[in-house]
Amino acid sequence: MASISSSGDGLDNLVDLITQKVQARLTGESQSTDPGYDPNTPCDVSLDNCNECGFCVTRKKEAVDNLIGIGAARIGAGPGGAKPSDNLAQYIDHTLLKPETTRDDLKRVTDEARQWGFATVCVNASNIPYVARALRGTNTKPIAVVGFPLGAMTPTAKAYEAKEAIRNGAREIDMVINIGALKSKNYQLVCEDICRVVEASKPYPVKVIIEASALNRDEKIIACALSKASNAHFVKTSTGFGKGGATVEDVALMREVVGDNMLVKASGGVRDEKDLRNMIGAGADRIGASASVAILSGQKSTSSY
C-alpha cells in the first residue's frame, strides 16, 4: 500500500494541498515560480516517490524508462502537445464488456485484435481465460475490468477479483473508483480501494476509472490526485455504462492533474478516427473503444463505448 496517512484529517489535508497546487497550475501559474525548482538540476527523489511532483518526466530519464517498461505508447506532454503516430491501433484497447457476450463474440474480438494489432483486448474477468489463450503469441495484452461498472464493491472484493484475473492471464487491470466514497469525501476508503488493487495486481499496471460524467470538476481533480498518490499507473475517464463517455475537456484536465509521469485513458463515445485523434491530442495515451475496427477502417459507429 502507498505510504498515505491513515488519519482522515491527514488525507483531507493531502487532498487540499494537491488540489491547490493543481488549481494553481491550471490557472497558469508556472512551476518556475517555485524557488526550489531548477529544471537543470538532476532529481534525487527515488523512483518509488517520483509521482509526488508531477514534473519528473522532464527531469528524470528513469521515470520515462519505467513508463515505457509497463507499455506506454508515448509519454504525454500536456494538452495538444503530442502528434499521434500513423499506427493508431497501438493506442486502442479493443473492448467488449456487454453482459450478453458469448464465446463467438470473444472469438471475433480476439481475431480482430490479431488482425489489426490492437494494444489490448478489454473484457470482463470471467472471459479472461479464453482471451488470454486466444492472444498467445501476439503483442496484444488481455485486460480485465474490476469492480465494474459501479465501483461500489469492498476493497477486499476488488483486490481478490484483480488477483484472480491476473492469475487467469490478465496483464492490465481497469478498476472503477468508489464513486460514492469520493463524493462523500471519504478519501481514506478511496485510497485503500486503489492501493489494495494495485498491490494485488503487481507487477502489472492498474487503470483507475473515475467515471468523470458523475463528478464535478473538483471531484475529477481529487479523483486523479488520489489515484496518483495511490500509485496507480493510469487514470481513465469512463466505464461506458455511466451518464456519458470521454470528452476532450476531461482528458485535458486529467492530463494536467496527473502530470507527465502517469498515463491517461479515454473511453466511451470514441466512434471514429477524428474522435480518437482529438483524444490523443488532448493528452490520452490509450483509447478504450468497442468500435475499434470501424475507427480504423473509416466507418462511423453508433457504439456507446
Image: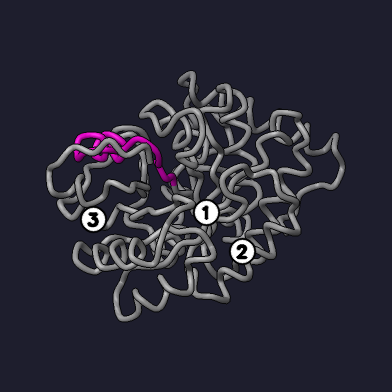
Q: CA separation, marks 1 and 2?
A: 9 Å
Cβ atoms at labels 2 and 3 below 8 Å apart: no
Residue at 75% across, 51% down: 154
Residue at which label 1 appears: 174
Q: Residue furthest bottom?
A: 137
- Residue 53, image quadrant: top right
Which residue sits at x=50%, y=28%? 243
Residue 91 place in picture, x, y as percent: 30, 52
Q: Earlier in the sequence, mark 1 or mark 3?
A: 3
| 128 relative position to 47: left or right | left
Amino acid bearing label 1: Asp
Query: Which segment did they paint magenta?
Result: 264-281
Q: Quadrant of the C terminus?
A: top left
Q: Label 1 to label 3, Cα distance in Å?
A: 19 Å
The amino acid on which the numbered mark 2 sits, given as a three-letter code, is: Ala
Neighbor class of circle 3 (other Cα within 10 Å; few <14, some 14-19, many 20+) is: many
Image position of 95 with respect to 180: above or below: below
- Residue located beneath label 2 in the image: 162
Give the percent coordinates (x, y) of residue 172. Answer: 49, 63
In the image, is residue 265 part of the stretch drawn in magenta? yes
Which residue matches tag 3?
A: 89
Q: Is residue 300 left or right of residue 241?
A: left
